[in-house]
Amino acid sequence: TGAAAIGKQVNYQIIGIDPGAGIMKATDEAIKQYDLSDWKLIEGSGAAMTAMLDKAIKKEEPIIITGWTPHWMFSKYDLKFLDDPKKVYGDAEEIHTIARNGLKEDQPVAYEFLDRFEWTSDEMGEIMSAIQDGKSPEAAAEEWAESHSDRVNAWTEGLTPVNGAALKLSYVAWDSEIASTNLLKYVLESKLGYKVTALQVEAGPMWTGVASGDVDAMAAAWLPLTHADYWDKYKDQVEDLGANMTGVRTGLVVPAYVDINSIEDLK
Ligand code: PBE
């Protein structure tokens, strides 16, 4: 392989995910800024993308995907981000927790817990890998919470459980968000007395749900860049509870055996 050959080998296709994901908009922008007009971004889903990645790696074929960390694929496979000298995929991204306006007054216990919640990529990675190894998301979240009670206690300390109040969270079926949302649901239910509905939706409805007040909160806002469009549109109708994780990253990702190192090499 090599810079000149890679386009032909992968049919000038970048394997994307669901169209509402911020990484898809960023990749459209990368195609413009790096002058990659021969290239096509293929829509699909996180699950379809990882299935194609697995297939390519088994055959040692080249593939280019839209990828991000934290993600279990980086522990399962030897992968690399392509350099992004123009910083189209941003720099220091964070995952924020976003609440509906009024949650603080209506559900102060859930609000305080969500406000305190923050963890690390490695911690999220433990839940993601357990799910990848065949555990249900619910069981993986429970097992993590029960074996990290020091962490869970720090988020719930001093909060008085409620008596079965309903709470709605929204999320997208990205592996990272499946892990975080199931953990929040487990802690809210088992430690704080809520009855939680976790609504799996597309990225747009995830944001509009919280903005309209139909949904109480979500923990899947990638900022400042990845979800900048959504943030700009809804920032006055939601409350940002700050980062629940720092040092996250998005970009174009290839198996380590693919012989290019920069998005510029796709030209
Ligand atoms: N992601 C994972 C999302 C945010 C979480 C990077 C695929 C995106 O909107 O691109």
Image: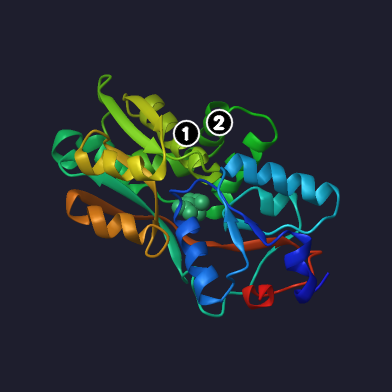
**What residue type is disc 2 on?**
Pro
Q: Is residue 256 left or right of residue 167?
A: right
Residue underneath mark 1? 182
Ranked by sequence position, the earlier of labels 2 and 1 is: 2
Q: Nearer the viewer, residue 164 or 131?
A: 131
Q: Are marks 2 and 1 in contact (CB under 8 Å)?
A: yes
Return the residue found at the far bottom.
85
Q: Is residue 158 visible?
A: no
How would you rate the neighbour count of disc 2 (Cα within 10 Å): few for under 14, some for 14-19, many for 20 or more? many
Q: How many marks?
A: 2
203, above or below 186, in the image: below
**Residue 38 percent location from the top left of the image:** 62, 68
**What residue type is disc 1 on?**
Asn
Q: Is residue 107 left or right of residue 142?
A: left
Residue underneath mark 2? 137
- Disc 1, SS: helix
Q: Quadrant of residue 121?
A: bottom right
Q: Going 18% across and 49% down the picture, which residue do you hit?
A: 237
Any atom of ligand 1 within 8 Å of the CB at mark 2?
no
Return the residue found at the far right.
59
Q: Nearer the viewer, residue 220 or 25?
A: 25
22, above or below 193, in the image: below
**Residue 68 percent location from the top left of the image:** 57, 57
**Residue 201 percent location from the top left of the image:** 41, 35
Q: Quadrant of residue 257?
A: bottom right
Determine the CA span between mark 2 and mark 1: 6 Å
- Disc 2, SS: helix
Q: Going 66% across and 45% down the picture, which residue do you hit?
A: 50
